[in-house]
Amino acid sequence: MMELEKELKQKMEEITPIDRQVMEAAWKNWDGLCKPLRGLGWLEEALVQIAGIMRDDRPHLDKRAVVIMGADNGVVKEGVTQTDQSVTMQVLENMGNDLSTACVMSHQAGCDMIPVNIGGLTDGVHPKIRNRVVRYGTGNIAKEPAMTREECVKAILTGIEIVKELKEEGYQLIVTGEMGIGNTTTSAACAAVLFGKDPADVTGRGAGLSSEGLNRKINAIRSAIAVNKPDPKDAIDVIAKVGGLDIAGMVGCYLGAAICQMPILIDGFISAVSAYLACMLNQTAKEYMIPTHCSAEPAAKMIMEKLGMEAPLHAGMHLGEGTGAIMGLSLIDQALNVYYHVATFEGGHVEAYTHQV
């Protein structure tokens, strides 16, 4: 085992289960409020999970970060996207200037945007961009591995370090997001390998491909799997051979959140693939993940089922950048609003409801 993998293994040993006693206390608080028991469904469940994660039955999420892992993907050379690779870094720059869709939505949700350049073709210019480039773009997976195993582990460790930094900066919750032209191709390739599916069954049009472009995308994934022969039981091997640096970075974010005992929101398809890969590395990390929406990408529902999760939002979204998770955060905010401001049964002069068998 190489030194970086030993380091990763040591860091993952810090991950412990969330606190079930605190969760029971949070359920007791919910059940004391003047409303039908468990009437808010997922909203109550999410807040109880957050309480267990934070080891506090009165959790607060005053400072939240949308972490965007930005990276370029060499498979773009196969004509699998509508735009060229220059768009990745341009959108990261736009995020620095608060111009992207996710930026506008994050302001409404009270989040700070944290663009991370983990593998763009160039360094970011805007001072808000955190340049942590592991390598400048990946290889073309249709012809070669995306990256070396060592680079993959380094990117995962980078994601862990980003979350640790944010924890030290006072952040309490992480929203996952990504920006990388070609990354629906790499995530579909990972899904096809992990679940033994034909690429045609897990591949969508991404940011608006034509039918001809979709066929090129499917064929590129088939070539990638045939050329690289990734091991579906080895998460690092899958990412290194057919994944991307943004995916590896998000895997690190999930592991980092578990290490730092912070709730982390799963966004859409690419984010969910990354969540699944993180769970392969450490199953307990799943306890820190909160699903938010089910992407319109073909394999999104399947991945959520494989994770054993049910996303509350089904809005046909497939934009990426953390936008679905930001919308999910608005549900959590309503849960917090009710949790802290609704009267108790005693205060509302109503006889308490009891759980019926």
Image: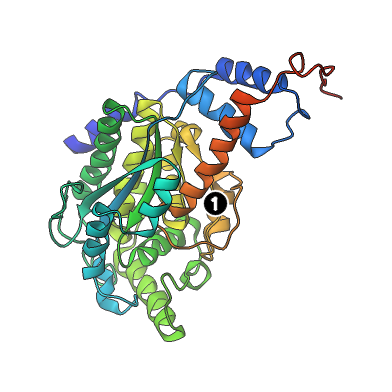
Picture coordinates of residue 193, whole percent (x, y): 43, 60
Picture coordinates of residue 50, whole percent (x, y): 51, 28
Q: Nearer the viewer, residue 309 or 68?
A: 68
Q: For label 1, count other residues whose C-alpha is less than 10 Å away and answer few (under 14), some (14-19) or many (20+).
A: many
Side of 255 where 199 appears, left or right: right
Q: Nearer the viewer, residue 317 or 270?
A: 317
Side of 257 where 116 appears, left or right: left
Side of 302 where 103 appears, left or right: left
Question: Could you tell me which quadrant the C terminus lies in?
Answer: top right
Side of 89 where 287 appears, left or right: right
At label 1, the amino acid type is His
Does residue 295 appear anywhere in the picture?
A: yes
Which quarter of the figure has residue 254? Answer: top left
Which quarter of the figure has residue 173? Answer: top left
Picture coordinates of residue 11, whole percent (x, y): 29, 28
Q: Residue at x 57, y 42 (%)?
A: 331
Pointer 1: what residue? 293
313 relative to 256, above or below:
below
Q: Residue at x 35, y 26 (%)?
A: 260
Question: Could you tell me which quadrant the N terminus lies in?
Answer: top left
Picture coordinates of residue 52, whole percent (x, y): 52, 23
